[in-house]
Amino acid sequence: MDKKPLTLLILEDNPDDAELEIKELERKGFVLDWKRVETEKDFKKALTEKPDLILADYKLPSFSGPEALKIQQELHPDIPFIIITGKVGEEQVVECMKAGAIDYVLKDRLSRLAPVVERALKEAEESRERKKTEEKLLNILENSTNLFYSHTPDHLITYVSPQVENILGYTQKEAMGKWTELVSENPLNKIGFNYTVEAIKTGKRQPAYELELIKKNGEKIWTEVRESPVVKEGKTVSIVGALTDITERKLAENSLKESHETFLTVLDSIDATIYVADMETYEILFMNKHMKDKFGADFTGKICWEVFRHESGPCSHCTNDNLLDQEGNPTGVKVWENYNPVVGRWHINYDRAVKWTDGRYVRLQIATDITQLKEMESRLQQAQKMESIGTLAGGIAHDFNNILFPILGHADMLLADIPEDSPFRDSLDKIFTSALRAKELVRQILTFARQESGELMLMKMQPIIKEALRLIRSTISTTIDITQDIKSDCGIIKADPTQIHQIVMNLATNAYHAMEETGGELRVGLKEVELGEHDVISPDLEPGAYACLSVSDTGTGMSKDVIQKVFDPFFTTKEVGKGTGMGLSVVHGIVKGMGGSIHVYSEPEKGTEFKVYFPIEKSSFEKQSIQPEEPVLGGTERILLIDDEEAIITMEKQVLKRLGYQVTSRTSSIEALKAFQANPDRFDLVITDMAMPNMAGDKLSVELIKIRSDIPILLCTGFSENISEEKAASLGIMGFLFKPIVMKDLAQKIRGVLDKDKNLVY
């Protein structure tokens, strides 16, 4: 890139001298755009073009260098001006330098010209940058809401910004003088005066301070002052500072101070633990009434960590060091939560630094009791854990069903085939009985997983509880007393009577085992309770009326760790042979399935109490019909059978053929759909497994019904969270078969579906 030419204005009457000056500069590498003038008129005209540099001869026939310098200083003082002269006295040169010339060069020593020009241009650029900076700074100072000033070590004001008129009522000119004359006689001003003296003496910045000043109209105002010393060669030459009007803030602080007692009265009326402590000594300055009641004493004057926490030193979680910044200003609210072992409660704490009545910063803590919230959080976590375990248990049960189904089916068929006096019959009976026991275990697992529920009906619990207690009484030791408080007015619930009996028996048996060695008292109660919005003790309960079943004992009790696991499947504290660990997990699943909630309260050596809540139903009893036992009936209809498990479909096919049916089987939903599409009228019934790969049983049923709307379909499932009987019915599915199923139940369900159009009861 070409170098930008230096615009040069030469005031010289001798062209040869001007030529020499130009050649000297060009020889030194300057690129020039120059103009030579001789008269005042031409000089003024050329000056309007604002050249970068002026070289002026000291003496011309009708004009002179000093005269040109005067004009330049008036019009464009920022342009560098250099005197070029032949012979001139020292006094004349000094006068020119004082008038604003950068330097001078003798005509017979032009070798100095280039260095002088370089220095002049550099100083001019620095001067322009400095001027811009000064203009910006001055603009900030003059437009700020703060008042800026500087004064000498003798306190004489050397500068004051225009805001002095807004803040103190003086003009800038009027304010020039000793700043101490503007200060009131308030004794507190001595603090600020001492800070200023110390800054002048040491050259070190001092803390901000407050100062009471007197306005021009005699009114007194409060200001906040921040000052810095200007030090040169180790000596303070001036003080610069900024002053802010804080009168309104001071009035507010004074008002707060005057209302201190009112403030403490308000704190006393708040139902939260509130106290104030010194941030250096930890001395308690104030406790509100609520906190005094919580701790049973007024600890004002004591050390907070000693009385509130029983610690031997400041608490590890203390927020004192974080409430003020390095400048000593409050940093805002610090929020934290913690368990207080002294009162045995959880709190969420709000700490902040506030000014006390004497002006010092103290720690104000407002703590809200969140113990109940923490307990509900724990219950929610437990509920989520149980839900996860339930999902896992349901999956295991499904796989177990697929293994159990063929065993049960083949054993059933073998028992039907072999003679009564066969030597194998006893073994087969045991296999079949064991398979039925395994089926019951699967049912319990599914109940825990809340993926199977019994037939719910409207019922009163009182007779079932009393019947269960009679049974318990006949089976447990007489060293255990049974006390019952069964309220007859407790309302109706919707439940499975068998499962209610199972709940009572399970809880009572657990209570018996807890007192088996020492004896004690088993207490069983039933009453109706009304849970309001603030009484609900579990996130899955809604406000309303509940039947509360309580079973408690005076036995060994449980630790917190045991309570956390008590509803987990297969968890037990009993000896081998006295429990599987499924009892309470099944109870938990039953209760959840009925829309209720179960809770345990226990302490080691103090006994245990279980409380079970069932929603009260407001409607009247439903009439329950008892169905007669059906004989095993077969038929000759054509059945499309679908299941992805080869062992299951083989066994089912044998059972159906034994019953007389014509069976077409498929292990793929897609293949089954193709077979049905090929000849829809070929089949009288479809039996499909729910958990099929590629296309689930319910989706397959929808596709089959699209092809033939009147095709009867039975859905076979071990469990399913995704489909219910209501949903199945809405899709056109005629019924459910729950794995594992025995031949008798399978036969009855098939005939029930096929004979429905003939109005036969099944």
Image: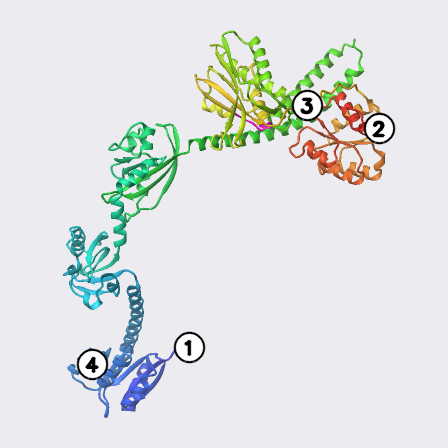
Label 1: which residue?
A: 2
Label 4: which residue?
A: 96
Residue at (34% x, 45% y) in the render = 332
The quarter of the picture where the N terminus appears is bottom left
Mark 2 neighbour density, 10 Å: few (under 14) some (14–19) many (20 or more):
some
Cα separation between marks 1 and 2: 105 Å
The amino acid marked with disc number 2 is Glu
Cα separation between marks 3 and 4: 124 Å
Label 3: which residue?
A: 623
Label 2: which residue?
A: 637
The amino acid marked with disc number 4 is Cys
Reply above or below: 371 against 437: below
**24 and 56: which one is in front?**
56
Find the magenta span and give its range: 592-598
Measured as percent of width and height from the top left, residue 569 is found at 56, 24
Foreground label between 1 and 4: 4
The quarter holding residue 717 reads top right
Mark 3 neighbour density, 10 Å: few (under 14) some (14–19) many (20 or more):
few
Secondary element at tag 1: loop
Measured as percent of width and height from the top left, residue 308 is found at 31, 30
Cα separation between marks 1 and 4: 35 Å
Measured as percent of width and height from the top left, residue 367 is found at 36, 36
Secondary element at tag 3: loop
Residue 587 horizontal side relative to residue 259, left or right: right
Upstream in sequence: badge 2 or badge 4: 4
**619 and 685: which one is in front?**
619
